[in-house]
Image: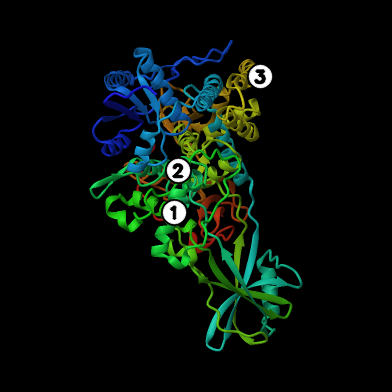
Amino acid sequence: MAEKKAHTLLIVESPAKAKTIEKYLGKGYTVEASMGHLIDLPKSRLAIDVEDSFEPEYITVRGKAKILKELTKKAKKAGHVLLASDNDREGEAISYHLQRSFLSKNPDLSIERIVFNEITPAAIREAVAHPSRIDDDKVSAQKARRILDRLVGYHLSPILWKKVKNGLSAGRVQSVALRLISDREAEVEAFIPEEYWTLDAELASGKHEFRAQLVKYRDGKPEIRDEAAVNEIIAALEKESFRVAEIKESEKTIRPRAPFTTSQLQQTAANRLGFTSKKTMQIAQQLYEGVNVGSNRLGLITYMRTDSTRISQTALDEVRRFLSNEHPKELPEEANSYSVGKGAQDAHEAIRPTVVAYTPDEVKESLTKDQHKLYSIIWERFVSSQMTPAKTKTVSVDIAAGEALFRVTTTRTVEKGFQKVLKLLGTREKNEKVPHLLEGDPLDLAGLHPEQHFTSGPPRYTDASIVKTLEEKGIGRPSTYAPIISVLLDRYYVVRKNKQLVPTALGRIINDLLTNSFPEVLDVNFTADMERRLDRVEENQEEWVEMIRKFYRPFKHRVDHVMDTLESLKGVMDEETDYVCEKCGRKMVKKLGRYGFFLACSGFPECMNTRSVPLADCPRPGCGGKIVARKKQGGRGKEFYGCTNYPECDFISHFKPTSSDCPKCGWFLVEKSDKRRGTYKACINPDCDYLHSHEEEEAQQPVEVEEEA
């Protein structure tokens, strides 16, 4: 190692991280931020030698030349440089490019690489004391991914421009995620709900009343398809006596869950806190890079991009000391261990607090509301992972009545164990209160309560469930889950409705084209295999050039074939309709725009008139209007659906019409969703009971709307 000069320049990626680290190192060190990648592929051309070596042609990122120039000057003055970008593939590439750029101007410059998993004084000093070299294999893996993504995007996007619409783009991994979301949407649309009924018995033992559910009838599971069937059972049971047939007790041990990986953090933050994956990662970045806690500035959590549940021995010792003081009865004799998931790179520890003594209550005043929520679940999950299991006791009571068997089950916690530290991650027990009963006890029937239900279709993906699916299928890595979702939303291939990810008309057209034309590239297993091969490159088990070459030749051949043979969809998108332009009298054409379908006058550009595409016929007798998407006066607020004959007709719906009409009354069906039933269809007619519940219908009041532009 070259002899260090008096002054050292340490380079990280972000100003927030630089600010935190500079406080720890003191005199003799200057900490600067590179602001991410300074050197990358140009945006305007392929810049890859596809004829021979597949070497990329890197340039200084537009707008970043000044930053690179300043860092080069400061590096020369310092004499010794420590590259401290993130400890992942992208971070390694940033350090690699900085090193090459600095050495091209100052060949004798002393440059070393340091890595750390947390931004605390001890971790930073340890990293500075033990510098290393750039990991060439990790750089190769990043280079291979970057080239792979460039080759796919650069060749697929022009197909979309030529065959669908200018300005569109496609990505390797994002297109596979779009396929998953589009396939699920097709399942949602194809699903036909089926009616079924449940039956509860309201029973009394002395003064105490409780409910039990019918679980068995005539030696089988009750399958009650309609109201007539449930009424037949009720008529038979009203003549029967009810008695306690059997009481079963069981105990269950519930183990604490492992500390968070990136995907688990994103899923839990989505389900518990309502955070999008992007928001979760932004807040986690803030907690990792450093916040002011009193007079100290500290990174509160470890690195937030990880697929491992591994915990360092130092952290285990610290949390066990904390528990021995705060919760000694819940401290196990030995530390709990958790298996690392299949395919995990295990490069980093799990996400955990850097200082366990900084409890959520301790740091609450130093954090924003959202920072505090995210820190709380990270702290709770980590600390609870090293505590004893919880134990529950379940009592199940079977009640016989003629050919029917009813059951009521209650569960209570007998040992809280790790649940003692759970607040945001805790769950409330919701149980039917059952009096003390003995087998053979007679019970009084207070009433029978039938309830109509409809089967729920497959749920649409949410941020949480798409991240879970991507992880399970081996698509993407911890650093890419949030960007995958963001790109699909930014391109308007997918929209978020009621926290669900729904493909737009544009997204589905693109998905159909790419899936049919490039089935292998958009195959989930193929994409997962490419991820594994990139891991092999990082592990020095596969050569990146050969990997790219095997992919590119057949892919380029397929691209050329599709470009030459695929019929243009541009004309297909423009569909002539029977609607007449109210301004010039010419026919309106249905077109696909940036935000979905709309109607435009066929006389464009002489006539610029546009309006919304009708979604359904107005159900009011004699109206003859069409239902279109509307917004309140001023164009603000939540979208609703109203009649084109407003104000003569004030019919509105707060739910989007589907393409189906009600088979009972002829009104249109709408799509609804709630936590209990998920996404389901219902008739918009308040007087029709088809797939409909009266108490769920919102009051339909006239709304002031503005005319279509």
Give, as a three-letter code, the residue at label 2.
Ser
Badge 2: few (under 14), some or many (20 or more) residues near its Cα, within 10 Å?
Answer: many
Q: Nearer the viewer, mark 1 or mark 2?
A: 1
Label 1's element?
A: helix
Label 2's element?
A: helix
Question: Between residues 623 and 667, which one lies in front from this camera angle?
Answer: 667
Label 3's element?
A: helix
Report x, y in % for residue 220: 75, 69
> What residue is pinned by disc 3?
554
> Which numbered disc covers residue 317?
1
Give, as a three-letter code, the residue at label 1.
Asp
> Which numbered disc covers residue 500?
none
Instruction: Identify the image quadrant of the C terminus.
Output: top left
Give, as a three-letter code, the residue at label 3.
Pro
Question: Between residues 657 and 586, which one lies in front from this camera angle?
Answer: 657
Of the numbered discs 3 and 1, the one sitting upstream in the chain is 1
Q: What is the spatial separation of the Cα atoms under label 1 and label 2, in whole angstroms? A: 31 Å
> What residue is pinned by disc 2?
277
Q: Nearer the viewer, mark 3 or mark 1?
A: 1
Q: What is the spatial separation of the Cα atoms under label 3 and label 2, in whole angstroms? A: 35 Å
Report x, y in % for residue 136: 50, 24
